[in-house]
Amino acid sequence: MDDLGLKKNYSFKNSAFAAPRYNDLMVEAYGKRYPDLTFIHAYPGTVRTNFAASAESTAIRIAAPLINLLLRPFSVSPAECAEYMWHGVFSYTKGPFLMGPKGDSLADKLHTGPEDQADKLWEHTVASTTIADDNAA
């Protein structure tokens, strides 16, 4: 929380870990500000896509059928994923939610941290995305 925006310690790894956390916190922040709306951050799990078949690496493209075969027991089709995600969307009413691969709530499995973290990220985001108006009174 002392390096929002990763200005001190940027790396691909740090950004990969920060992005989902930032999404969780922003869902929380939006939920506080708009309590009559529903905000969901979903983790769909492993979905069978043509990711490997369309990779830039020739080796990965060649291995794509084997990769898909090995991942099949641990993955779902895009249509099955969509069914789970829509089930989750229609299962929740108002507020912020974290949703798992089967449309299940992850609220009891994830700890989002102190309540002020969502507010700190909100303030950082507003400050980072607001254009100063030099002509303002």
Image (cartoon, rainbow, N blue to C red):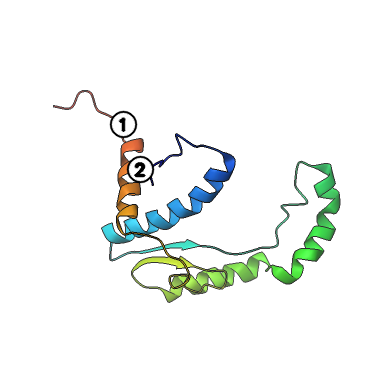
Residue 19 got which mark?
none
Q: Amino acid at mark 1?
A: Ile
Residue at 49 percent across and 37 percent down: it is 9
Rendered image quadrant of residue 69: bottom right
Q: Amino acid at mark 2?
A: Thr
Residue 81 in the image: above or below residue 57: below
Rendered image quadrant of residue 98: bottom left
Residue 123 spot, x, y in % from top left: 30, 44
Number of residues whose C-alpha sits closer than 10 Å to that of mark 1, classed few (under 14), some (14–19) or many (20 or more): few
Residue 29 spot, x, y in % from top left: 33, 56
Residue 66 in the image: above or below residue 60: below
Q: Is 113 on the left or on the right of 105, as rendered?
A: left
Q: Of label 1 and label 2, which has the lower sequence position?
A: 2
Residue at 86 percent across and 50 percent down: it is 62
- Kind of element beneath mark 2: helix
Q: Nearer the viewer, mark 1 or mark 2?
A: 2
Residue at 57 percent across and 69 percent down: it is 101
In this rendered view, identify the residue nearer to me: 70 or 34. 70
The residue tagged 1 is 131
Residue 125 got which mark?
2
